[in-house]
Image (cartoon, rainbow, N blue to C red):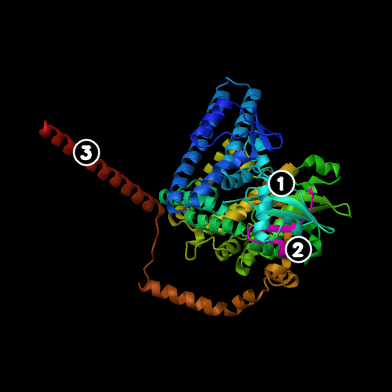
Amino acid sequence: LKWREGGINSGTVSRRRRLFGRKAASVSENDRTKTFGDVQIADEEFISGWKRTGEIAAKGRRGRALATFRRSAEIWFYFSSFYIKDAWIMKNYNSGRWTKDKFQEERAKLGGELTQNLLRLGPTFIKLGQIFSTRIDIVPKEYIEQLKLLQDNVPAFAGTRAQEIIETELGKPINEIFDTFNIEPLAAASLGQVHVATKGDKTFAVKIQRQFLRELFDVDLGQLKRLAGFADAVDLTSEGGIMDKNTQRSWVSVYFEMKRLLYEEIDYMKEIENCNRFRTNFQKQPKFSHIRAPNTYPEYTTDKVLTMEYCPGIKITDLERIREAGLDPAEISRKSAESFLEQLCRHGFFHCDPHPGNVSVEKLPSGEAGLIFYDFGMMDEFGSVERKGLVDFFFALYYDADAKDVCDALERLGMLRKGVDRISVEKVGQDFIDRFQSTLKSGDQWEADLPAEEQKKLNRQRRKELGEEFLSLNAESPFIFPPTWTFVLKAFFTLDGIGKTLDPKYDLTRLTAPYLKELLDLKDGNAFRTTLMRVLKRAGWRPIDIDMAVTQPRRVAKIEGVVKRMERGEFKPRVRAMEVERMIDRNKLVQSNIFNAVLSCLFLNTAASLTTLGT
């Protein structure tokens, strides 16, 4: 396996090793290595840096402080270096000094360097690279080709060390536990590595956790917590997405959710429970008989050693082998999307990390494609209220096209604050739904896929039509971003990247529509009731409609009473002028700037006076 990194000669590598306290490791013929340009580096050397950080952090408070300082310097050095080099490459290409071939070559080299640096930074950042390795829509393909290597080819630690960990954890010599144990790892992941073992007629995949993982998490997550606090303090916002000004968010809450899941992921006893629950959920439904999860063996499992059934398969993004097996990539992309929607809407228990290294394909006896899921450490769940809210949201968006029902569903999901001005939210929401339905039915491009200039034109037109509503939304920030949805979106992004790799025409939004027909039983308790309620709604014969007709005279009388009280002056209407509010906000900003300017001039004048007196 060749790993490319351009512009990195042996002198540069040596200087970097000295900077972070690493010694060059001698490479023997039997060592597992990665090749960067003309430099060959042993796997053990990749992990030595963050392993050393974990060892230092394990020595107590002073050791953790030293490890944090060392880690911060390393992280800032790597990422600032990447940013500067990427900007330099873009500048050369945009100015016309480089051809497209030269540009792509240099980017591929930088992608190799980025991959190497993520490997040196360890598990937390390897996971970050795994996420971006699937985002072919936002990450340049030259980088993706290199980042893909992080999915299932992370540097492994010594097999003898893995054997020692197994013997320590299970309390027996390896030959008493298994008949055979392959000292060479089958695959290495960010948090551990897998070895194949046998006992009798059974073949096992044994996952062994890396050393000092918890200590390294303590250091890395501590820095991420500071970054989250900084993001909340400066109120990072942008237009669109989870950082939109209309959305309230707490990055510290997202951090705590991420911390909880990461620490659960390194508890292998918890992973066994997750795997068994995931398998049981899909076994209940014949439609999803193509979904498979390995059997588990608790008798050979501890917190740091996990033994499961060995289930080989084809990597889900390996198009060449998939086609050789006579399988349809488009069918696989559809099945992967449906399996995740099923986890969200019906099970309420979902895989947070379905990157290509954790999902494989197999050919079933029927000739169809089956999916094998691995790595159940990072799982999360919804309650029944959130599941019902999600199903109601999908139905309101796809079938009913009703902004009020959409807002009700978002309120149940905890995404819309209670007590906000629903009129503005529903008006903007109805505009979005109308455009969504129009694009869905016509098969045209989504707005996000249009050229940048056309998107700006549409945005200007929308602001002109809905200006006051947008001002109201900005003033109230009616939307909330719950932390759990961070990992739902992460999984959606990952699956979207896999789908686009398998099928250029893949569109998760359009795949959702036919799948919703199978969720009729979840909306109102059963499929018959949902269908009946939809028919009665169109005919105007729902219980609520009948109640409205019966109580109408009483309601009219109440309105008449309100009007009479208004005539007598007992009610005082409260009017909200958005333009006036905007003007007041502008005046406040101007006054604040004037005050700061006067105060600055006062301090400057005082300093000048004191300096004059002093001389």
Element type at mark 3: helix
User: Residue 383, image x and y in percent?
Assistant: 61, 67
Residue at image x 62%, y 25%?
103
Residue on which disc 2 sits: 282
* Residue at x 64%, y 36% (from the top left corner): 42
**Horizontal arrangement in the rendering, residue 111 relative to residue 587 (left or right):** right
Q: Is residue 81 visible to the viewer in this orientation of the structure?
A: no
58 above or below 522?
A: above
Bounds of the magenta span? 296-313
Is the residue marked by circle 1 packed among few (<14), some (14-19), or many (20+) residues within 10 Å?
some
Dot 3 or dot 1: first in sequence order is 1
Q: Nearer the viewer, mark 2 or mark 1?
A: 1
**Quarter occupied by the N terminus:** top right
User: Are the residues tagged 2 and 1 within 8 Å (C-beta)?
Assistant: no
Name the element at disc 1: strand
- Which residue was labeled with disc 1? 187
Mark 2 crowd level (few <14, some 14–19, many ≥20, 10 Å Cα): many
Which residue was labeled with disc 3?
A: 601
